[in-house]
Image (tube, grey):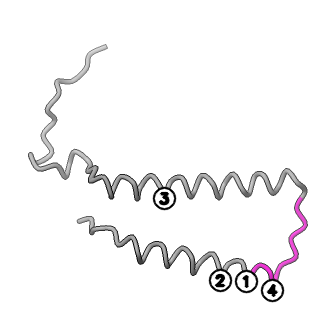
Amino acid sequence: MKKHPLDLTSLIFGLVFLLVAGLWTVHRTIDIELPPAGWFVAGGLILVGLLGIGSIVRGVLRGDRPAAESEDGGADTQPPMHG
């Protein structure tokens, strides 16, 4: 599958829209009664997701590409390591 370039503006607006719509929906329909530990778990999962998105965006902006898509046709330039 061919990768397409990242449109950072669309990504940011999409994430802001999802955040606002999600918060509105939760506020209007659900009364969540979580113990304090539950909020920490939920916040941790959200943080892990945001870190994953951030690492992908940073890699795209820096121009990192997997070896299979490199300019030399994906040839491995280092000899294999033997343990």
Residue 3 point in image, percent of width and height: 27, 65
Residue 30 point in image, percent of width and height: 83, 79
Q: Which residue is mark 4?
A: 28
Q: Where's the N terminus, which quadrant?
A: bottom left
Asked if labels 4 and 1 touch by Cβ distance under 8 angstroms, the answer is: yes
Disc 4 residue type? Arg
Q: Secondary structure at mark 2?
A: helix
Residue 49 point in image, percent of width and height: 57, 57
The part of the chain drawn in magenta is 25-34
Label 2 Cα crowd, 10 Å radius (few <14 / some 14-19 / many 20+): few
- The part of the image, by quadrant, that contains residue 38 is bottom right
Disc 2 residue type? Ala
Q: Earlier in the sequence, mark 4 or mark 3?
A: 4
Residue 51, relative to residue 32: is it above or below?
A: above
Asked if labels 3 and 4 touch by Cβ distance under 8 angstroms, the answer is: no
Q: CA distance from mark 1 to mark 2?
A: 5 Å
Q: Which residue is mark 2?
A: 21
In terms of depth relative to the viewer, which is nearer, 58 or 41?
58
Q: Secondary structure at mark 3?
A: helix
Q: Earlier in the sequence, mark 2 or mark 3?
A: 2
Q: Which residue is mark 3?
A: 53
Q: Which residue is mark 1?
A: 24
Left or right of residue 55: residue 18: right
Disc 1 residue type? Trp
Label 1 Cα crowd, 10 Å radius (few <14 / some 14-19 / many 20+): few
Residue 46, relative to residue 9: is it above or below?
A: above
Work out which residue is located at the far left of the displayed protein and give it: 72
Q: Is residue 15 magenta?
A: no
